[in-house]
Image (tube, rainbow, N blue to C red):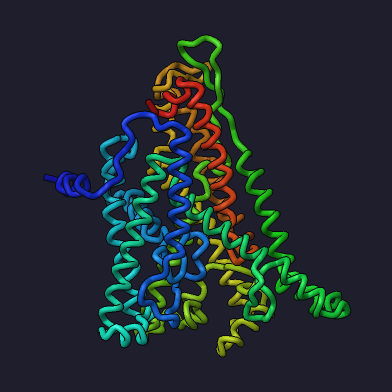
């Protein structure tokens, strides 16, 4: 018996959300989606019992697209799901695990393997943070309860694991009973919350200015002299510290992503049996969506986690850290660009001075930007190609879907092979171009920064996911009205 055959019974016994037996009506899907969204916000505000205020959040810089909340049950967010997806996609893409993703049995095996790996990743992502001393028990609480700090640590670990499992099943509920995916929904929720905070938060940041854009400018107008604001340093102050650059970047990213999402090649279709019934199959510029960018950033986050754990053990050959920020070595170059404070030399120098360490030279900063650009663009292409193959969006699965719906491409024979040949002209090329483009766009967005510290990657993901969610809602409404359209999407 092969390893795949021996693992199938194990994967089949894993706990799972039951699939609907028939078509789920739009109102029910909307109810499930909103219900899970409310539950996510509720769990994100449930603090971990026994957690010390001195604990350090290793993934603070990645919160926007990991959809987690520091110090809460949602500490890990979608990190384990994304990491498991990265590992499996790399293994399948490299043919270490041989799967035909157009085969329903292999698709089921892939999904079972991913779920099993998520459980493993929940433990592997929680343990280093606890073992490294970044997540600490509250000593005062332990003394009050008369228990050891080790017991409080174990309780914290169990809570983190429970939160990770809840995220997994919440994502499954949305995927099977709701609209879109839970992963996308949680990212939008987290990023939206950060942007609202970035606009209306009146609490002060480390510079002494209010965090929210509107309250920040009320303070600046009342307390900063006009002569300074229109000087060279003042213009830089208004752009960066004043949040104008972040505001303009946020608006520009929103408009650009909406425009790019609407850019597509449309392949004409005609129904073989119903005369006059015509349609179009859209191949978008961002055909694989922006979700592969999560995989790229998650890969960087896991590399940084390894560096942090090694540094905490006194192994600094790969770089040293101040909190969760690398300040030298190869880990500095492999860390993602998040804002102008990571690449504008004067701002980088000021940041490193606050850490009490020597700032990198200009060439080192330039190399840091170059490495991140390569990571995003090349990684965007690779993960976009893996994504379409593992999600059934490749040329062959798409051709089967079109054929089974009764549609054909005018001027070509009505068989899967003919449809697949046409799809091969467009899908792989558009996927590569789209993956590279979205990687470049992510780099630019990250360099400029965004409102609320959501990060360019987070905002890019959120806008694209909301746009696609709008399209999903529109298609759901269309399927409610036209049963034939429902059969095209493979739903009963």
Q: Is residue 419 left or right of residue 276?
A: left
Q: Position of residue 436 (x, y in %)?
A: 55, 51
**Residue 136 sits in quarter:** bottom left
The structure residue drawn at horizontal position 27% and vertical position 40%, both measured from the top left corner, is 106
Task: Using the rendered image of the protein, determine whether residue 449 is visible from the camera's viewpoint.
Answer: no
Work out whether 32 lies above or below 368: above
Q: Position of residue 96 (x, y in %)?
A: 28, 52
Q: Given the current orientation, which residue lies at the most extreme front position?
A: 144
Q: Position of residue 146 (x, y in %)?
A: 26, 86
Q: Name the residue nearer the viewer: 378 or 197.
A: 197
Identify the image quadrant of the C terminus.
top left
Work out whether 354 lies above or below 435: below
Q: Is residue 341 left or right of residue 40?
A: right
Q: Is residue 223 left or right of residue 375?
A: right
The structure residue drawn at horizontal position 46% and vertical position 20%, both measured from the top left corner, is 484
Q: Name the residue nearer the viewer: 45 or 384.
A: 45
Identify the image quadrant of the N terminus.
top left
Q: Position of residue 73 (x, y in %)?
A: 39, 65
Q: Given the current orientation, which residue lies at the most extreme bottom position?
A: 356
Task: Using the rendered image of the protein, determine whether residue 432 is visible from the camera's viewpoint.
Answer: yes
Q: Given the current orientation, which residue lies at the most extreme right position?
A: 227
């Amino acid at each position: 018996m092969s390893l795949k055959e021996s693992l199938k019974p194990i994967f089949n016994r894993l706990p799972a959300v039951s699939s609907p037996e028939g078509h789920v009506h739009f109102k029910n899907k909307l109810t499930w989606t909103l219900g899970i969204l409310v539950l996510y916000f509720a769990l994100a505000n449930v603090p971990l019992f026994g957690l010390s205020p001195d604990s350090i959040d290793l993934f603070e810089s990645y919160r926007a697209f990991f959809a987690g909340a520091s110090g809460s049950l949602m500490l890990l967010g979608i990190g384990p799901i994304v990491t498991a997806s990265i590992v499996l996609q790399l293994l399948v893409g490299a043919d270490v695990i041989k799967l035909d993703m157009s085969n329903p049995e292999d698709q089921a095996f892939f999904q079972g393997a991913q779920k099993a790996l998520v459980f493993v990743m929940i433990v592997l992502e929680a343990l280093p943070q606890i073992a490294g001393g970044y997540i600490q028990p509250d000593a005062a609480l332990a003394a009050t309860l008369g228990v050891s700090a080790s017991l409080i640590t174990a309780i914290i670990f169990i809570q983190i694991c429970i939160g990770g499992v809840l995220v997994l099943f919440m994502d499954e509920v949305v995927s099977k009973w709701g609209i879109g995916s839970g992963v996308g929904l949680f990212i939008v929720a987290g990023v939206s919350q950060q942007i609202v905070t970035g606009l209306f938060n009146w609490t002060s940041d480390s510079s002494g200015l209010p965090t929210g854009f509107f309250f920040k400018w009320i303070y600046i107008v009342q307390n900063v002299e006009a002569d300074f604001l229109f000087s060279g340093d003042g213009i830089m102050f208004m752009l960066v510290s004043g949040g104008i650059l972040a505001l303009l970047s946020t608006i520009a990213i929103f408009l650009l992503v909406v425009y790019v999402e609407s850019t597509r090649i449309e392949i004409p279709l005609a129904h073989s049996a119903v005369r006059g019934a015509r349609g179009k199959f859209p191949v978008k510029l961002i055909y694989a969506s922006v979700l592969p960018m999560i995989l790229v950033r998650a890969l960087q986050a896991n590399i940084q986690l390894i560096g942090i754990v090694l540094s905490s053990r006194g192994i600094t050959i790969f770089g040293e850290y101040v909190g969760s920020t690398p300040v030298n070595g190869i880990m500095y170059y492999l860390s993602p660009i998040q804002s102008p404070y990571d690449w504008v030399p004067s701002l980088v120098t000021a940041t490193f001075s606050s850490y009490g360490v020597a700032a990198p030279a200009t060439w080192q900063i330039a190399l840091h930007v170059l490495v991140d650009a390569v990571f995003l663009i090349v990684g965007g292409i690779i993960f976009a190609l893996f994504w379409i193959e593992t999600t059934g969006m490749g040329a062959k699965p798409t051709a089967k879907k079109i054929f089974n719906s009764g549609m054909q491409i005018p001027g070509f024979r009505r068989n899967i092979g003919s449809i697949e040949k046409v799809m091969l002209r467009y899908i792989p090329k558009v996927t590569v171009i789209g993956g590279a483009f979205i990687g470049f766009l992510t780099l630019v967005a990250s360099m400029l920064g965004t409102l609320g510290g959501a990060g360019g990657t987070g905002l890019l993901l959120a806008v694209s996911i909301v746009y696609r969610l709008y399209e999903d809602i529109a298609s759901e409404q269309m399927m409610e009205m036209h049963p034939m359209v429902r059969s095209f999407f493979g739903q009963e």
